Image (cartoon, grey):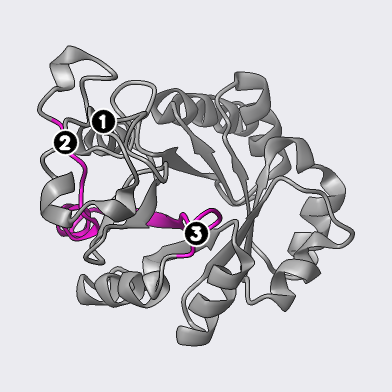
Amino acid sequence: MAKTLIYAHRGASRMAPENTMAAYQLASDAGADGLEIDVQLTKDNIPVLIHDETVRRTTNGTGFVQDYTGEQIKKLDAGSWFSTKYSDCSILTLEEFLCWFKPLPMVLNVELKTNVIEYKKIEEIVLDLLKKYDVLYRTVISSFNLNSVTRVHELNKKVPTAFLTSTARRNLPNFAQEHGASDLHVKYRLLDRKLLDQCQKEKMPLRVYTINRYSYMAKCFRLGCDGIFTDVPHQAVAYRDKIQNSRTL
């Protein structure tokens, strides 16, 4: 059985402020196989790493990401909300992140946050940057927005695309494939043997979010999911190794 890959969800986001360099460095140090990032666009079409459409929850600013220029958004404090020791953290641009990520032996999941605001040409902008830094083919591009999944697939059919969903559907893998998805990312409660068998039949990688409990991790590892997204990659790596080592005894 292939190893279930561990993606750090917004980095090691239980240990440092999400989507910041501090969180991604901790995830890399913890031995995560991959990183998950959230991407939105500024007013001047700079892709930046932030989960929410507004900056209020994770910075000292207010208002929508799309109302800031890249220069303006970089001035916000993106760490103090988590802990004062992270007051020097700023919002990362996608280019800053990729410059750091490129030499690492890791895989990447880019979530396009287009399910609330459909940023114009975000798919093309992100693809161009991934190509520039030569990480295109170790990256999965995912979204809850099927329009984004389809657009990425139409722009480059070789790049893995994933449909993100928390909604059960009849024959979910086929539904995702019809919209250009090569992979499937589902909320934990949707995971069962039937779905896994359907994905395996279609040769469709199945990854599960957001897995922080040991009991949930164990189910994913034992079923042989292709990957999990977790806020605690250090714990997930240790637990996966424990389970896998017990199989070989």
Residue that protrudes farthest toward the top in the picture: 84
The three-letter code of the residue at mark 3 reads: Thr
Q: Quadrant of residue 212?
A: top right
The three-letter code of the residue at mark 1 reads: Thr
Q: Pointer 3: what residue?
A: 114
Q: CA distance from mark 2 to mark 1?
A: 6 Å
Instruction: Verify whether residue 6 appears in magenta.
Output: no
SS for dot 1: loop
Q: Pointer 2: what residue?
A: 76
For label 3, the crowd category at 10 Å Cα-Cα, with few meaning under 14, some 14 to 19 and many 20 or more, is: many
Is 114 on the left or on the right of 40, as rendered?
Answer: right
Quadrant including the C terminus:
top right
Q: Earlier in the sequence, mark 2 or mark 3?
A: 2
Image position of 3 with respect to 154: above or below: above
Q: Pointer 1: what residue?
A: 59
SS for dot 3: loop
